[in-house]
Amino acid sequence: MRAETLLNLSLPALLLATALIAHWLDEPYIITLATRAAILALAAVGLNLALGLGGLVSLGHAAFFGIGGYAMGILAFHAQTFTPLWGLIEGTKSMPVIWLVAVVAAALAALVIGALSLRTSGVYFIMITLAFGQMLFYFAISWPTYGGEDGLSIYLRNDFPGVNTLLPLNYFLICFSLLAVVLVLFDRLAKSPFGLALQAARQTPARAEAVGLTPYRLRLVAFVISGAITGLAGALFADLNRFVSPNMLSWHMSGELIILIVLGGLARLSGPVAGAMLFITLEYFLEGLSTYWHVYLGAILLGVVLFARGGLIGLVAGREVAHD
Amino acid sequence: MTEVLLETRAICKRFGALQASKEVSLSLRAGEIHALIGPNGAGKSTLIAQISGALAPDSGSVIFEGRDITRLPTPARAKAGLARTFQISALAMEFTVLQNVVLGTLGARGGVYRFFGNVMRDKALLDRAEDALDQVGLSEFRNFVTAELSHGQRRQLEVAVALSLQPRVFVMDEPMAGLGAEGSHRLTGFLDGLRQRAPILLVEHDMDAVFALADRISVLVYGEVIATGTAAEIRANPEVREAYLGEEDAA
Amino acid sequence: MSAALLIEQLLNGLQFGVMLFLMAAGLTLIFGVMGLINLAHGSLYMIGAFAAAGTAALTGSFWLALAAALMAAALVGAIVEMVVIRRLYDRDHLDQVLATFALILIFSEGTRFLFGSLPLYLDTPDILSGPTTLPGGLDYSKYRLFIIGVGLAIAGGLFWLIGRTRLGIQIRAGEADREMIAALGVDIRKLYTLVFALGAALAGLAGAMIGAIQAVEVGMGEPVLILAFVVIVIGGIGSIKGAFIGALLVGLTDTLGRVLLPQVFGLIMDASSATTVGASLASMAIYILMAGILLFRPSGLFGGQT
């Protein structure tokens, strides 16, 4: 078995084991950390589709993460206050419904933002995705109905049929299962006809056109799927914290998602998982070390960018991305 | 008169003060190799870009199988059956050799928006891709990562990708560039047979290949076609000798 | 709305615009000449503001504070260019984004470590305090007029520098072709450091001047950075003229939007919802402007073809 395949299986297994052992040791905080890692990994898998496979450096994925979060917040808010949205739509506490709404809302936003920003490329694309993300950030701050700057709290975690979601381990397992499903989907997609075409459009757009493919359309579809996955992660994240605020839409969030991917390994299946676990671990230990832990994070990141391209998985599995 | 498949009608293209294409009218007939030669900077690449769709002409039109495709974007031209090769290899360097060719067969077949199913296990695509690789003699390198190929092998792969499209017409931009004498000789032999399947508009610097292969030759100088004819006619043309071949004799 | 209020808001928009220009000019030059996207440009703005606030606290002089801001930002800019940025010119945009994002983390936390988390304040000098009466009888803040004046003077200076001087020729040559300029015998490393330090100094100056209007705090540069990106997208990368026009457009749209939109909505709904809806839309106005321009000119008003 190749080193990377081994990693693809063992990293999620390690995450699962961490949560299970923490449950056995009765350490709910560690379970929460593992859940956070699973959710961030999920968001980053979404971004990895656009960034890793499609080569689209989106600095605005917090928009989709936040939209997912607000989809959860708004639906649960209307359910817990018994005030239908626009006097019509009842809120809901049902996770599957919330997820569906989060995915659809994020996909629609990605369609609009993508359709506009993909007309450009390179630095323009980076700046424009950043700007649109920031637009939603300011909108969330200035719109008072759902808490504005202060954000929106939910009294109780939402429901999943047949599962007591209040137990930390149960909620972890829900998030972990979704991560596993999306990882499998990502793997299938990367090897599918669409995946081949998308990666070709990244490496050599002129060739893609010359064989009859339209890079713009390929990228837009990838961007929409990518946004939808990140939106799902946003709904889970808000549910974990029982809180959603404009911070989920902040561009630091977009930056962190990119960091996760690059720390783990760009375009690798397990890159986001490795990156998220590493990030949460760093956060946990560095935060204990110093209140100014972002200095260390910055220094590590700078070191990785300047001297260790390929990320964690690259160190283990070699520089070249596998194609099989 | 044989059927004309591809035609440019009075194409003009200007970049500021530079007239890159001046009233260029060319035709490519079924079964022929039509070579386009000319000194560096004569506007060959600009012309190819306008034929393949990367650039829009200022005036004039491109006709493909009787249909005006001047406003058609590149992918649509490719789908209609116009396959080009690139002067500087435009291959997906991270892909394997086989993946690059499968990309071609996938583009030609369509069904790109399928998100499941391993494209490298698609029998129909693979068969055509393997066949194309076989024709250019790259079969044994099918699992090499493209970045590992030699320059000559990349040139062969360029041709294989074009073959995999099973096009109606080939537009080849200096396929021999950088090939050794032996490679060039082999490719010459291959193109010789290929013209029966689909005609080739061939831009080439290798004069031996051009004069060995071309049914007709057009000479482009300063964006303008100064002569079109058979190899013998072009050799005998005083204007061509002066403008172009003369330079080479001197060099 | 009265004409006086409208003129006052126009002037506010102009002041905001020239401040954005100081940020955007540096960014667009750095991108145009070195091909680098620098997210840490907002940190240089912040460094300028902190240097000014710190110097003012020590010496009590606003003018020394401005000078300190310019020097601190230019110095930090030059050092950062030599230590980190110069390794990024040949990298792809993703690496540039990550490395400069890392720099933001380092600068922000470093500043927090040095100055603490409480905001600082910078006082305007006596000569610029209070309002002055404009021709036509309108009272307007002297200090904001000062910012407008400085901004316009610097814009003029930049146009002269780029258009008329030897350095400007080198910069324009660098935008066109890196190798050509090296062939001309220009020390390209020195030129890059110089351009980066110049951009940093402009950002630092902007931060210091704004520091007398707003609180000086960690993270203050980031909203401005993103607005400067919007300016560049609108104006076109690498174009000083585009940055100038874009900055004024963004400054005016944002300022006027915040004043006018709630009033416009007040015509069709009750006052409190009009304020809410108007304010929310106003916060998005410049992005909608950007989207509109993108639809028609993907490479900006004054950008070349992408």
Image: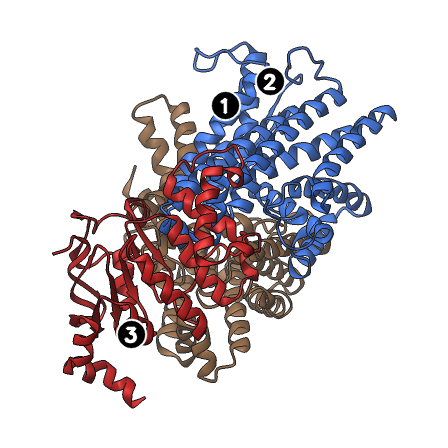
Chain colours: A blue, B red, C brown
Closer to the camera in the image, A215 or C152: A215
Q: Nearer the viewer, residue B21 or B97?
A: B97
**Which chain hosts label 3?**
B
Q: Is residue C252 above or below residue B159?
A: above
What amino acid type is highlighted by mark number 3? Gly
Residue drawn at 54 percent across, 9 percent down: A82
Q: Position of residue B11 (x, y in %)?
A: 17, 61
Q: Element type at marker 1?
A: helix
Q: Residues within 10 Å of mark 2 (few under 14, many from 20)?
A: many
- Relative depth, front residue between C225 and A308: A308
The chain ID associated with circle 2 is A
Q: Is residue C124 above or below residue A183?
A: below
The earlier-in-sequence mark between 1 and 2 is 2
Give, as a three-letter code, the residue at label 2: Met
Q: Which residue is mark 1?
A: A145
Q: Give the residue displayed 45% in from the left and 49% down from the top.
A: B131
**Is A207 placed above or below C153 here?**
above
- Residue B45 placed where, x, y %? 30, 66
Image coords of residue C287 (percent x, y): 40, 42
Task: Read off the chain for label 1.
Answer: A
Question: Which residue is painted at 82% across and 47% down in the image?
Answer: A289
Q: Write down the quadrant of residue A172 in the picture.
A: top right
Mark 1 vs mark 2, foreground winner is: 2
Residue B170 in the figure: left or right of residue B98: left
Q: Percent position (x, y) of residue C113? A: 73, 53
Whether residue A298 sits left or right of residue C233 in the image: it is right
Foreground label between 3 and 1: 3
Q: Which residue is mark 2?
A: A95
Numbered label attached to residue B41: 3
